[in-house]
Amino acid sequence: MSDNEPVRVVVSHEDITALKLTEEALNQSRESLTEQKQSLEEANIALKVLLKQREEDKLELEKKVLGNIKDLVLPYVEKLKNSPLKLKEKTLVQIIETHLNDIISPLLQRFSNAKILLTPQEIQIAALVKDGKTSKEIADIMNVSETTINFHRKNLRVKFGLRNKQTNLRSYLLSIS
C-alpha cells in the first residue's frame, strides 16, 4: 500500500496441501491405470492365442473322432447289418447305428470334417451337387450311370443325416461349406 506512511504489504496464505495431495494421488492413479491397461492388453493377446489353439485342438479332436468311428466302428456295424441276424439283433444294430450317427452328426456340420466320412467319389459328387448340377449332368461328367449318381446322392443324404427330411441336398451342402 502506498501513501505517505511507510510501505506495507499484505500477504495472504492459502493452504494448498490438500490440492497437491489430490494431484499426486491422481497422477498415481493414472500411472496405475496405464499399467493395468497394458497388463490387460497383454492378457487379452495371450487369451486370443489360447483360444485359437483351443479351436485348432477342437477341430483336430473332431477329425480324430470321426476318423476313428469311420475306420474302427462303422465297418463292423456294416458287417453286422449284412449278416444273418434275428430281428431283435438287427434292431439293436440299427439302434447302434442311429446312435453313432447322432453322436457324429454335430461334427459333420463342418464340410471339411464331413469329408472324412465321404468316399472320394462322394466328395466329387457333393461338390458337383453344390455347384447345381443335376444327376444326369454329373453322370455325364463322371462317365457313370445316373443310377450310380442317385445311389451316391442317397448315401450323402444318409451320411449328412438328411434321411426322411425335406431338406434339399444342394442347399444343405451350401450351408455347411
Image (cartoon, rainbow, N blue to C red):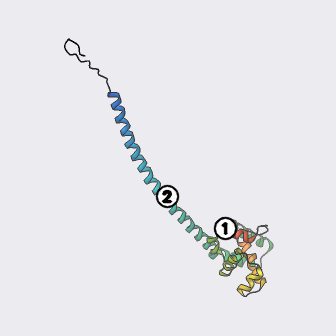
Residue underneath mark 1: 176
Image location (x, y in percent) of residue 128: 70, 78
Residue at left 79%, top 70%? 88
Q: Quadrant of residue 26?
A: top left
Q: Quadrant of residue 89?
A: bottom right
Image quadrant holding the C terminus, namely bottom right
Image location (x, y in percent) of residue 124: 67, 80
| Depicted 51 relative to depicted 25: above or below | below
Q: Amino acid at mark 1?
A: Ile
How busy is the neighbourhood of tag 1: few (under 14 within 10 Å), some, or many (20 plus)? few
Image location (x, y in percent) of residue 110: 63, 68
Residue occupying the far bottom of the picture? 143
Q: Amino acid at mark 2?
A: Lys
Q: CA distance from mark 2 to mark 1?
A: 25 Å
Left or right, 29 with respect to 139, comes to left
Image location (x, y in percent) of residue 31: 37, 43
Residue underneath mark 2: 48
